[in-house]
Amino acid sequence: MSIPLDDVDRRVAAALVQDGRAPWRRIAAAIGEPERSVARRGRRLLDEGVVRVLALPNPAGLGLAPYSLRVTATPASLREVAETLAERADVPMLSMLASSNTCVGEAYLRVGDARAFLDVLGAIPGVTAYELDPITRYHRTSSGWRPEVLTAEQQAQLGQADEMARLFASPAEFDPASEALFEAMALDGRATAESLSERLNVSTATVGNRLERARSNGQVFIRGVVSPASLGYATEAHLRLMPRLSELDAVAERLSALPMTRVCAVAGTTVVASLAATGPLPIEQALRDLAGEFPSIEPVQVDVVAEGLKRSAIRFVDDRPVSDLREPTGTLAASAR
């Protein structure tokens, strides 16, 4: 069951999804609410874990490569298989489907580790099939999801319009100063410049400059993590499209421009996406429009999600985040160890 939020709560949460480090003053100005009320609500959302703000280092900088993961299991063992996968640090995202006895997600593996990972999959009791396709580029990550809880004008006031998804999992190098900053932010992507400067023994101006440079260079991504259901999006779906090869990026770009698209990537010769909407009909209409523009995507495969077990390395149970972030065992950094 999703955590009930009122309209103002949802707008504050959506603002944190857009920019997890936005000051309460900026959020208040954007959504037209008193700063004191916004700060109180925002802190409650963070303290109760409804929203988690993460600082995710670029996986490529950790020597990790992203893969689209799809695992089929016997109906009786699907839950156990999904739970087993969700416990793995190298599987930061995982959902169980309602439309088939399958779970889908992403895996982040070191170069050369795919074979060992497949051996692990094959050894899980109940697994009957699996697919592991390399993700070559992202057109949107969940850092760039812009739920329509906020108007376009409110989103513009918040800033951070371009998440630079193209840089996620692209080649990146971390210098010692960057690594120290990411480690300091591992447990709290919203940590203040003052607390970071004390921990790193540098000035707040230096912290601000390093963080801004790391974000613009695609070294680190600030991500507000929340269950879509908490924002009023009761339907999640996983989408797989196989357009003409010449249209792969055009289809992905068009799909990533939709407000309902949370994640969109090219994996092999397929466009994969995660969608969130108020119901199935908006998804159907969006795909009908997309097929009208790109007929080669048909037939379209849409799988409704029964449960999201893991989002951005955070475990969820009944749409509630339950991971204990006191130890970063479920982060991308953990999977690189």
Image: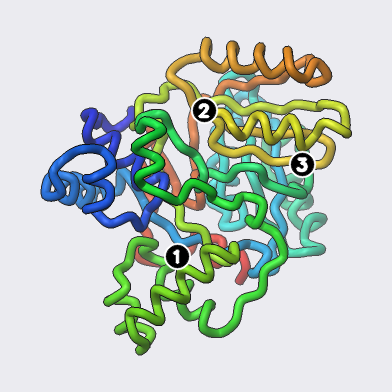
Residue occupied by mark 3: 267
Camera-side residue: 90 or 123? 90
Does any portion of residue 21 appear in the rendered image?
yes
The amino acid type found where label 1 is placed reads Pro
- The answer to which of marks 1 and 2 sits earlier in the sequence is 2
Camera-side residue of 91 and 161:
161
Residue at 34%, 43% (x, y): give it. 15
Q: Secondary structure at mark 2?
A: loop
The residue indicated by pointer 1 is 328
Where residue 4 sits in the image (x, y, percent)?
25, 29
CB within 8 Å, label 1 to label 2: no
Q: Quadrant of residue 244?
A: top right
- Above or below, comparing residue 295 to residue 184 in the picture: above
Q: Is residue 71 above or below residue 161?
A: above
Quarter of the picture containing the C terminus is: bottom right
Question: Residue 258 lies in what quarter of the image?
Answer: top right
Q: Nearer the viewer, mark 1 or mark 2?
A: 2
**Rendered image coloring scheme:** rainbow
Q: What distance separates the C-alpha of mark 3 from that of mark 1?
A: 28 Å
Q: Earlier in the sequence, mark 3 or mark 2?
A: 2
Horizontal side, residue 141 vs residue 136: left or right: left
Judge depth for marks 3 and 1 and give the one in front.
Answer: 3
Q: Give the residue type at disc 2.
A: Met
The single residue placed furthest to the bottom in the displayed view is: 201
Residue 184 location, quadrant? bottom left
Q: Residues within 10 Å of mark 2 (few under 14, many from 20)?
A: many
Q: Which residue is mark 2?
A: 260
In the rendering, at what x and y percent does residue 104 appear?
A: 64, 35
Pointer 3 or 1: first along the chain: 3
Which residue is rendered at x = 45% and y = 65% of the image? 328
Residue 254's x, y, as percent? 67, 30
